[in-house]
Amino acid sequence: MIVAERRKVIKELLIKNKSVKVSDLVDLLHVSEETIRRDLTQLGKEGIAEKNYGGAILIEEEKNHSIIPPVNKRKLQYSIEKDLIGKAAAQLIKEGQIVIFDAGSTNWYVGKNLPENSHLTIITNAIDVAEECSKDETASIYLLGGKLRRNSMSLVGPQAEIELQNYNADYVFLGTSGISLRQGFTSSDLYEAEIKRAMVSSGQKIVVVADHSKLQKAGLTSFCHFDETDIFITSELADKEILKEIEKRGVEVIVVPVSEEINEI
């Protein structure tokens, strides 16, 4: 078993049982205690596990300092900017393509601006995104199964991750809680991060959409590094120096003008 697979197993056990023991993991994974301790150290750096004597415990969502408002409230924050980003993102999509959306207010605006009568196949774990996209009667919509997170009205967990293995999408659109030049695109929720990683593995083109405020903070854990990302769409309000650094890392950056629209309000 390779390192990534082993750590995924440990993360799944942490999420399920809230804690793990080094001795149990040694027996289960057939590796040394030293190897398991290195794995737990790495998961600690990712903000997933807190090491203790003999093992580690899951860092629960409520212990995180990043508090995310409900998704309907987030739609109202920077709504003009998000709508313009959504329009730019939607223009990438061609008729008949397969598209994956994760949960998030900016992704809802992408769904809102999809081209009409385009016979798209849409896969999402976000109830509100599915509802918005269903307004196009030519679209085929698949809602992933899993546990409901009321805060984002999204479905998460192993069931959704397994279902994603069946898909090969033309585009994957992902929102982000924050952006770090060291860690890439980050999430403030461990469960959402796992779904996002699974979506990255199921797409040909990976597109991250985010308003300017996300460049000023980093979330709890990384879900997609710059070398895994094809396109990043934001607005001209974003920090230009950070955008230049992202471009240097091989990501196509699309910057949407917003000044005129904001001045008209």
Image: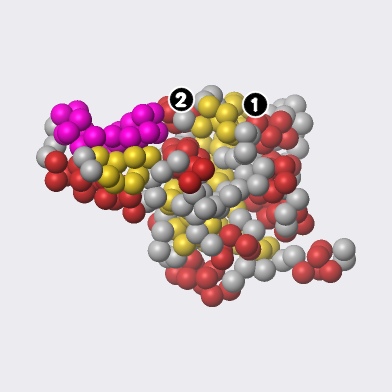
The image position of residue 108, as x and y in percent, is 68, 43
Q: Nearer the viewer, mark 2 or mark 1?
A: 2
The image position of residue 186, as x and y in percent, is 48, 53
Residue nearest the viewer, comparing 261 with 40? 40
Q: Which residues are magenta?
A: 6-28
The image position of residue 89, as x and y in percent, is 64, 51
Q: Is residue 239 visible?
A: yes
Write down the residue under mark 2. Answer: 159
Residue sitting farthest toward the right:
264
Q: Main secondary structure of the magenta part?
A: helix
The type of residue carrying mark 2 is Gln
Crowdedness near tag 1: few (<14), some (14–19) or many (≥20) residues, C-alpha within 10 Å: some
Quarter where residue 84 is shown:
bottom right
Write down the residue under mark 1. Answer: 140
Marker disc for residue 16: none
Vertical order, 179 against 96 (above or below):
below
Residue nearest the viewer, comparing 19 with 173? 19
Check if residue 48 falls in the magenta segment. no
